[in-house]
Image: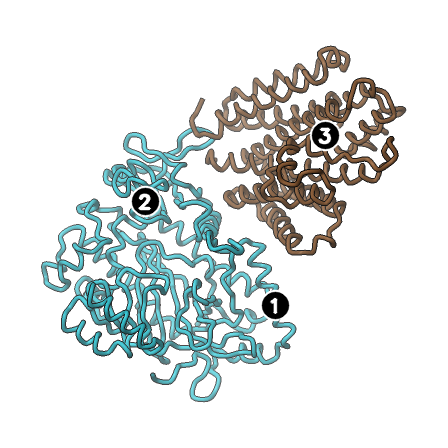
Chain colours: A brown, B cyan
Amino acid sequence: MLSRTASHLYWMARYLERAETTARLLQVGARNALMPDIGGGLRNDWEAVLQALGQLEAFREKFGDPVQRNVETFLFFDSANPASVMSCLAAARENARVVRTALTSSVWDAINTTFQELQGFHRMERSKLLVNDLADWSLRSGAQIRGAIDATQLRNDGYNFMGLGHSIERGDNTARLLDVKYYVLLPSLSYVGSALDQSQWATLLRSMQAHRAFVWAYKGEITAAKIAHLLILNRQFPRSLLSATQGSVDHLDALARGYGHTPRAASHARGLLGELAEATIEDIFDEGLHQFLLRYMSRNSEIAGAVQSSYLEGVPE
Amino acid sequence: MTQTFNEMIDGGSVRAAYQSLEKWQNEMPADLRQMKQSEAEALFRRVGITFAVYGEGGDPERLIPFDMFPRVFTADEWRKLDRGIRQRAAALNAFLADVYDQREIIRAGRIPEHLVTHNEAFERAVVGIRPPRNVWSHIVGIDLVRTGPDQFYVLEDNCRTPSGVSYMLQNREIMMRMFPHLFVENRIAPVDGYADALRHTLASVAPKKCDGEPNVVILTPGHFNSAYYEHSFLADLMGVELVEGQDLFVDGDFCWMRTTEGPKKVDVIYRRIDDAFLDPLCFRADSMLGVPGLMNVYRSGGVTICSAPGAGVADDKAIYTFVPEMIRFYLGEAPILENVPTWQCAIPDQCKYVLENLGDLVVKEVHGSGGYGMLVGPKADKSQIEAFRAKIEEKPWNYIAQPTLSLSACPTFVEEGVAPRHVDLRPYCLVGDKIELVPGGLTRVALNEGSLVVNSSQGGGVKDTWVLAE
């Protein structure tokens, strides 16, 4: 397969995953805006949402205070914001368009239809578009595209490059959300364990669509340790760091089998997986959650870098 | 101007070939028509058949308007076109092989030397090269117009990289999907063998140095190119890689592509970029689209480039006049398809005639395309004519002139119902180990009433083109 083709497939998948993350955060922000504040009014978590995406500064420069309607516009429609659903889906679609020959017609159809519908929203009156509907639509479209990939793509190298893109991006996004929630949402350490803390953690679970899953898997009250376990070490939870890393390892192994050559990226990924498999939540809290997550993100991007140099530049190792 | 020939009508009654269409159109209620039209548009958008226009504002992905009323050729009509097109494609290739080698046609005094060697498209860098099977133009698009029941004219030849064939294929797919019963009532020759024939043609001109199954690729300028959809569509139908210049590199005697498993040798390149951009070491040094060193590999027979660099010298409007002469000279046959009578402004007597009759003629730039830079005498006002007169006097060699032809018209869906609109035809002839032509082509239609300009950039649309089976 052409290196450039592999690269477009990989980035297509990363952008699709990223669009879903933004959509989920949009959903969470909208829900939180309906919750009472301990101060008496309604809460405003939009800042945190923007922070999670690394877009708070950019937003402030453009709009000033985070007013809900502006945040919605910024996160959903704004093509100048690289993390907006619009930008991510447009980038995913552009990557797909370039390598249409490597996609089945169902996958292309799913991506292109999504993009056409998105263009349609753009032409509609904003007051007719409810933020929850937009977020739902994004998640549904994402599911449709992933479903089409799952149901129709040959399990060849192209499939594995898409899988790698999903896994690497997913690991990064989960780590990022967890990190931001832990540090930004908690104004000071004295809040840990308070009622505010509870609802913040619940928010984090919602942003991963994991609230129900948590309740089923862990029962009882929400604690930081349980949530960290779910999002970092739980093999059953598809967005946990362990599951995402397992995905990277599986796709790299499949590529290595197909090509008869084990790339550097595979040993990086295996090393990270090994560490996660051995780790306990106590170890992680001892190290400091923030330090641990930073380390995870940097090792995850090491894998991405190795994928780039092993496969996407067309120069054999 | 004489009466316009309406292809559906023969002396007041509907021709047999169009009878089921006439009934279909009469029985179609206006709302159904509307619905079908938007269904067609949605299908085009959904499949992604758009052409890209960047930098003009508005939606960068535009649709070429699709007219649902098909254009029909009978088996008899097609038989003549088929023979004429193959004959022309063969003669054009013989001419290219000759002008880059012995130049017999020039030495025989049948074509003036300066028209060839002073031609911008004449490529000194390829003189003496003999591509595999001595084929230079592998895909020849011949633009035809019709003025009467039996009168066809060749308007121009396209020997480089004629585009539009994806529309020929997709127009048919969409018609079959929307109106299956029309295909039951009529016996319509299929066009979907085109991709296989193209792949066969390209593989058949693999270099001698290639052993085993040739690795064929399509070279595109990239996804910002207006015809990118077509490039990727053809690559997909043929099952070959679609590459950009950055995916290829030269090492030793061969050209390679960068893959996830390391370099892989490339044998045949169907390029959809112009000569000037192919190799920055040989042609334009600022080209980012090409592959440095490619021409050296080509010269030493390591790779085949389709169409061959330099093929453009056969298709400009000054050489066009001599194609009937080529047919007689190389094939020893009488031309089956006629040229439009053409005056060369480069020749003083002919230029004088042109300047005296500007009001009745169509004047074109020798290297112009897309319907730009031309004067349609009968439709122009005085100041336009005078402006053109000045241009011709300044650079006579840059212009040719032709009589205004009364292009045939085909029934076309318009606002008020169905009305005749002018059409042309571009069939795609393939030349490799044999000459192949699928029965059909791209019919372009001038959607504006009375307009003769069929280019999509100026209000043109496309139609499905049927050739009825015998």
Read off the chain for label 3.
Answer: A
Tell me the distance, in whole angstroms, between the alpha carbons under discs 1 and 2: 42 Å
Residue B145 locus on image (x, y percent) = 36, 72
Dot 3: few (<14), some (14–19), or many (≥20) neighbours within 10 Å?
some
Q: First in sequence: mark 1 or mark 2?
A: 1
User: Which residue is rendered at x = 74% and y = 53% of the image?
Assistant: A127
Are marks 1 and 3 in one subunit? no
Dot 2: few (<14), some (14–19), or many (≥20) neighbours within 10 Å?
many
Mark 1 and 3 residues: CB-CB less than 8 Å, in contact?
A: no
Tell me the distance, in whole angstroms, between the alpha carbons under discs 1 and 3: 44 Å
**What amino acid is found at the position of numbered circle 1 in the picture?**
Lys
Residue B76 locus on image (x, y percent) = 38, 75
Name the mark nearer the viewer: 1 or 2.
2
Residue that mark 1 sits on: B36
Image height check: is B47 above or below B207? below
Residue that mark 3 sits on: A238
Tell me the distance, in whole angstroms, between the alpha carbons under discs 2 and 3: 48 Å
> Which structural element holds mark 3?
loop
Q: Quadrant of the C terminus of chain B?
A: bottom left
Instruction: Say which of B74 and B5 sits in front.
Output: B5
Residue that mark 2 sits on: B277
Image height check: is A183 above or below B132? above
> Which structural element holds mark 2?
helix
